[in-house]
Amino acid sequence: MYITVLKSKLHRVKVTSVNIDYDGSCGIDKDWMDQLDIREYEQIHIYNISNGNRFITYAFSEERGSKQISINGAAAHKANKGDLIIICSYILSNKDDKFLKPKIIKVED
């Protein structure tokens, strides 16, 4: 049997831009993506602390070191610039496998 477990989490990061007129997805500073082992086009879950919205999209990289988080396309209806969000990625694991501790970055204002 397989279970879904948390692989990585970017906690309390601020949305820096929203753009409805974009193909979609969530842009994340490439440094954070590397630290969390999130790959381009990987599915991510976004939990909006500011308004309670939850949605699923995919990741793409923003400029390294920019601290940019962009919410784009239809997902832009779920967040506003300045909202605090949590970005999570998950993996499927055999329930008998040794549990791997998730990578977590807690962002401070």
Image: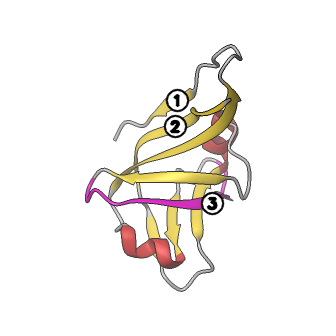
Q: Residues within 10 Å of mark 1 (few under 14, many from 20)?
A: some
Q: Residue at x 67, y 49 (%)?
A: 30
Q: Residue at x 34, y 68 (%)?
A: 80
First of labels 3, 1 by sequence position: 3
| Type of the residue with mark 1 | Ile
| Type of the residue with mark 3 | Tyr
Residue under pointer 1: 104
The answer to whether the residues at label 3 and label 2 have Cβ atoms under 8 Å apart is: no
Which quarter of the image is occupied by the N terminus?
top right
Relative placement, left or right, of 22 versus 76 is: right
Q: Main secondary structure of the magenta part?
A: strand
In three-dimensional space, the C-alpha distance between marks 2 and 1, rounded to whole angstroms, equals 5 Å
The answer to whether the residues at label 2 and label 1 have Cβ atoms under 8 Å apart is: yes
On the image, the x and y values in percent for residue 26 come to: 56, 62
**Numbered mark located on residue 58 in the image:** 3
Q: Residues within 10 Å of mark 3 (few under 14, many from 20)?
A: some
Is 91 drawn above or below residue 101 in the view shown?
below
SS assignment at label 1: strand
User: The magenta stretch spans which residues?
Assistant: 50-64
